[in-house]
Image (cartoon, grey):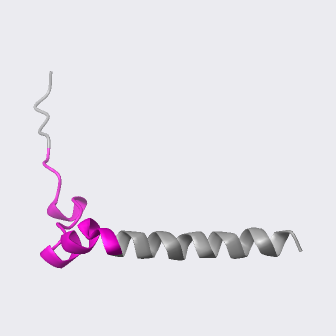
Amino acid sequence: MGNYRFKAYYDEAYPPVPDKATLFWRKFVPWQLFRFLILNIKMIRIVAGGHS
């Protein structure tokens, strides 16, 4: 067997770690509900537009 060396992954291959603000908004339930409503409104507009 040859002398094969394995290289470690570069730091650029890993995703960035979210900061405190990002983690806060991901866990903040009122924000999640607001985004959920916005998403539903967008879907309703698409579906309603297809039925007219």
**Relative image position of residue 3 (x, y in whole percent):** 10, 31
Residue 46 found in image quarter: bottom right
- The quadrant of the rendering that contains the N terminus is top left
Q: Residue at x 14, y 34 (%)?
A: 4
Give the total of numbered labels: 0
Residue placed furthest toward the top: 1
**Relative image position of residue 23 (x, y in whole percent):** 20, 69
The answer to if 48 sits in the magenta stretch is no
Q: Residue at x 24, y 59 (%)?
A: 13
Q: Residue at x 15, y 74 (%)?
A: 19
Horizontal placement of 42 versus 15: left or right? right
The answer to if 18 sits in the magenta stretch is yes
Residue stretch rendered in magenta on the structure = 7-30
Q: Residue at x 20, y 72 (%)?
A: 24
**Relative image position of residue 14 (x, y in whole percent):** 21, 59
Residue 29 found in image quarter: bottom left
- The quadrant of the rendering that contains the C terminus is bottom right
> Relative to the observer, which residue lies in front, 16 or 28?
28
> Relative to the observer, which residue lies in front, 17 or 36?
36
